[in-house]
Image (spheres, coloured by chain):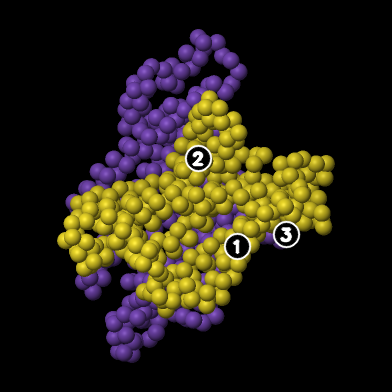
Chain colours: A purple, B yellow
């Protein structure tokens, strides 16, 4: 177990290092720097600006300097939001995105597992057919359609919930549902297939033969095994929620990191772009590590039990 | 080789017996036909402006008109052309990369397999769409100036489409690689492979002539399921304003226009409803078809 965690931690750093390198050179080699959009500035001032943001010197020099700063935890200054550091901007926007992401994560997993189990247990009934039909429909509709439609109904027609923004907990509900929707559906399908397979296995029949109540058999025995494919989907789920939240934050005008990401690309805000990419990758790789640990832990318990 | 490419006996019949699959096939055929032949029936140029702003659906404009007085129906059909093109070509690229990768990893097994699958796992845990956004934003001006310099001025407008196809194709291959590899692992020790090896055939020939035809079924299923995934990715980028640019249209950019004019005072519902409807029906048909194909081709999944 310890060797496993150690190996994964090393690969975590390799991944982060590669992502930083690729993104840095992509952004720096692209035509047009962060200051070329504005009106012509005198060469002396441009030189000063480049020096202030440490964008002068050879590309290799810039890269190695940046790596050193990142290791020290300094993500440098934003070139668009003058005099504000990337650390500051992230500290202010990341908690917002994380809250939304976490809520959607919980919604997607619990909702999906529950719905999938229900469909499998009532196999071939109307519950099964309609919920799976609904799931496939939900997967096929992009979030930027469900989002505005939900707003149109719940916020503009019946005035139950706010249109967007980030004022109270009620403004969280619609974005979280929008973001989680397709993944509730995906996990429900995953869960149904695996539950159907598990319900046909010998240990379930044994449990039933011993006269255990149906709910004990399903929730006490079968669920533990059937949930494994869902656990291995949690890593990709986190990645999808992360990119998905960029769209949802745009729709609901939520002041999260996603909006900053889109802005930073359009403004060539080099260090903000790099900073967000690094933090996103680090979060994902860490999450994947946790998921893998959870998986081996669950798996072992199954082998023992 | 052609003999081996045959689907399991009765697969085609099983597929046609499934009403959902037949409906999906008909719907898809209709949409593709309208996309290609649409301009013959609807005489509006999707990019030409008119004074008729925000006209609700009428006999003349069945889907209404948008902020610039453009006919929404012809915009949706033009968008369909680009979205379907990106979806189909992107899925083909991902199919080529994913299948080849999975075949090699599964066939050679052992250390090669371990390293290759480790790489796939690492890619799974990277926010790939974020890197694609960065890359396509950065390579677009480069490709544009390269096309300009080479004299292909007519193609300059399509540089974004080409980039989208390439980049989306190159990120959506992971699941395909995993599935193919799993299948090949199960096949590589079977007797027909051993026989081919004993006869001294090259690895290349064994992989592509003997193993590939045997996994054709599952590959076709996932090819069908990759198309909607790529279409969704493309619409995601276009919605954020990072994909197809005006005056061109894709479903994503049309939906983005529609979502912007949603407000309580005056709702231009047709701008959102019709593109959303056409797109969702297409994706739904593709997903249903993929599911039906799985039932017809994969005997293990049959219940």
Give coordinates of residue B200: x percent, y percent.
18, 57
Q: CA distance from mark 1 to mark 2?
A: 27 Å
The nearer-to-camera label among 1 and 2 is 1
| Label 3 crowd (10 A; few <14 / some 14-19 / many >=20) | few
B92 in relation to A201, above or below: above
What residue do we see at 35% from left, 76% from top?
A198
What residue do we see at 59% from left, 62% from top?
B28
What residue do we see at 53% from left, 21% from top?
A35
| Label 1 crowd (10 A; few <14 / some 14-19 / many >=20) | few
Q: CA distance from mark 2 to mark 3?
A: 41 Å
Give coordinates of residue B136: x percent, y percent.
49, 37
Disc 1: which residue: B29
A87 in relation to A184, above or below: above
Disc 2: which residue: B163
Disc 3: which residue: A157
Helix, strand or loop status at disc 1: helix
Query: Position of A138 compared to A8: left or right?
Result: right
B235 in relation to A25, above or below: below
């Amino acid at each position: 177990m310890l060797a496993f965690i150690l190996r994964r931690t090393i690969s975590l750093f390799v991944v982060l290092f590669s992502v930083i390198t690729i993104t840095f050179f992509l952004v720096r080699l692209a035509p047009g720097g962060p200051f070329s959009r504005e009106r012509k500035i005198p060469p002396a001032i441009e030189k000063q600006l480049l020096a202030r943001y440490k964008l002068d010197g050879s590309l290799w020099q810039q890269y190695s300097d940046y790596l050193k700063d990142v290791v020290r935890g300094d993500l440098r200054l934003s070139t668009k939001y003058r005099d504000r550091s990337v650390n500051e901007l992230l500290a202010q926007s990341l908690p917002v995105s994380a809250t939304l992401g976490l809520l959607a994560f919980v919604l997607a997993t619990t909702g999906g597992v529950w719905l999938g189990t229900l469909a499998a247990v009532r196999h071939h009934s109307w519950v099964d057919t309609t919920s799976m039909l609904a799931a496939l429909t939900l997967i096929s509709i992009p979030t930027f359609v469900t989002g505005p439609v939900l707003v149109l109904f719940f916020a503009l027609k019946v005035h139950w919930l706010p249109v967007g923004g980030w004022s109270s907990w009620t403004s969280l509900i619609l974005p979280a549902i929008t973001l989680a929707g397709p993944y509730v559906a995906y996990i429900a399908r995953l869960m149904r297939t695996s539950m159907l397979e598990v319900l046909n296995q010998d240990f379930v029949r044994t449990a039933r033969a011993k006269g255990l109540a149906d709910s004990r058999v399903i929730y006490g025995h079968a669920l533990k095994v059937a949930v494994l494919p869902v656990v291995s989907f949690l890593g990709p789920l986190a990645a999808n929620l992360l990119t998905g939240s960029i769209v949802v934050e745009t729709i609901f005008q939520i002041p999260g990191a996603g909006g900053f990401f889109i802005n930073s690309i359009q403004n060539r805000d080099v260090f903000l772009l790099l900073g967000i990419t690094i933090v996103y990758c680090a979060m994902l790789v860490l999450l994947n590590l946790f998921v893998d640990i959870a998986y081996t832990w669950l798996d072992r318990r199954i082998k023992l039990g | 080789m052609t003999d081996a490419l045959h689907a399991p006996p009765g697969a085609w019949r099983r597929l046609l017996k499934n009403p959902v699959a037949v409906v999906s096939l008909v719907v898809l055929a209709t949409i593709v036909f309208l996309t290609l032949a649409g301009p013959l029936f609807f005489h509006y140029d999707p990019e030409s402006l008119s004074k008729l702003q925000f006209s609700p659906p009428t006999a003349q404009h069945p889907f209404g008109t948008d902020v610039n007085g453009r006919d929404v129906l012809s915009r949706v059909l033009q968008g369909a052309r680009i979205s379907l093109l990106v979806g189909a070509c992107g899925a083909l690229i991902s199919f080529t990369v994913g299948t080849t990768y999975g075949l090699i990893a599964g066939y050679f097994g052992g250390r090669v397999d371990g390293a290759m699958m480790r790489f796939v796992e690492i890619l799974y845990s990277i926010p790939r769409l974020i890197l694609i956004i960065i890359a396509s934003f950065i390579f677009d001006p480069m490709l544009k100036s390269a096309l300009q310099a080479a004299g292909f001025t007519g193609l300059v407008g399509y540089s974004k489409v080409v980039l989208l196809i390439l980049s989306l194709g190159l990120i959506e291959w992971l699941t395909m690689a995993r599935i193919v590899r799993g299948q090949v692992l199960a096949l590589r020790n079977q007797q027909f492979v051993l026989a081919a090896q004993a006869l001294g055939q090259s690895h290349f020939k064994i992989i592509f002539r003997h193993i590939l035809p045997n996994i054709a079924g599952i590959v076709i299923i996932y090819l069908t399921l990759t198309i909607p995934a790529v279409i969704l990715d493309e619409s995601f980028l276009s919605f954020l304003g990072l994909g197809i640019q005006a005056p061109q249209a894709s479903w994503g950019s049309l939906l983005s226009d529609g979502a912007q004019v949603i407000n309580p005072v005056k709702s231009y519902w047709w701008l959102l409803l019709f593109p959303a409807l056409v797109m969702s029906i297409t994706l739904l048909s593709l997903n249903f078809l993929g599911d039906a194909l799985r039932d017809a081709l994969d005997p293990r999944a049959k219940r």
